[in-house]
Amino acid sequence: MFKTLKILLDARLAKMEERGASAVEYGLLIAGIAALIVVAVFALGPIVKEAFSDTCDEIVAGNTDIASTCDS
């Protein structure tokens, strides 16, 4: 009887340990994805800003009725 109870308790403890390991793995995965997003934003930020600036300059140059300027 006690042997069966010990086996059941050990199985339950092992299951709880796996749950904690899964949470850590998911946390690391989310941290990795966030790091990749930050790197992509910093790497592509100047390129996107230049594209918008060029577009604004072309619009202003092509239409003399636009009173605003391209301030960033």
Image: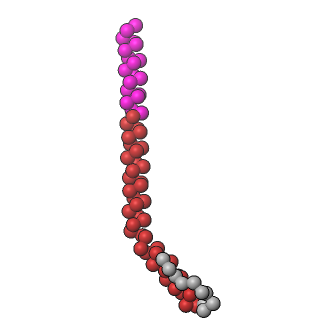
Residue at x 37% of width, y 30% of height: 17
Number of numbered callouts drawn: 0
Q: Quadrant of residue 69 in the image?
A: bottom right
Q: In percent of the image, x 40 and y 7: which residue is there? A: 1
The answer to whether residue 66 is magenta is: no
| Residue 71 percent across, percent down from the top left | 50, 80
Residue 59 seen from this side: no
Q: Is residue 72 visible?
A: yes
Q: Where is residue 16, by image quadrant? A: top left
Image location (x, y in percent) of residue 43: 39, 68
Task: Indicate whether 39 appears above or below 66.
Answer: above
Identify the residue at image location x=41%, y=28%. Answer: 15
The percent coordinates of residue 58 (x first, y second) are 54, 87
Inspect the magenta stretch and tell me whether residue 6 lies in it.
yes
* Of the pair 65 and 50, the residue shown nearer to us: 65
The residue lying furthest to the top in this view is: 1
Q: Which residues are magenta?
A: 1-19
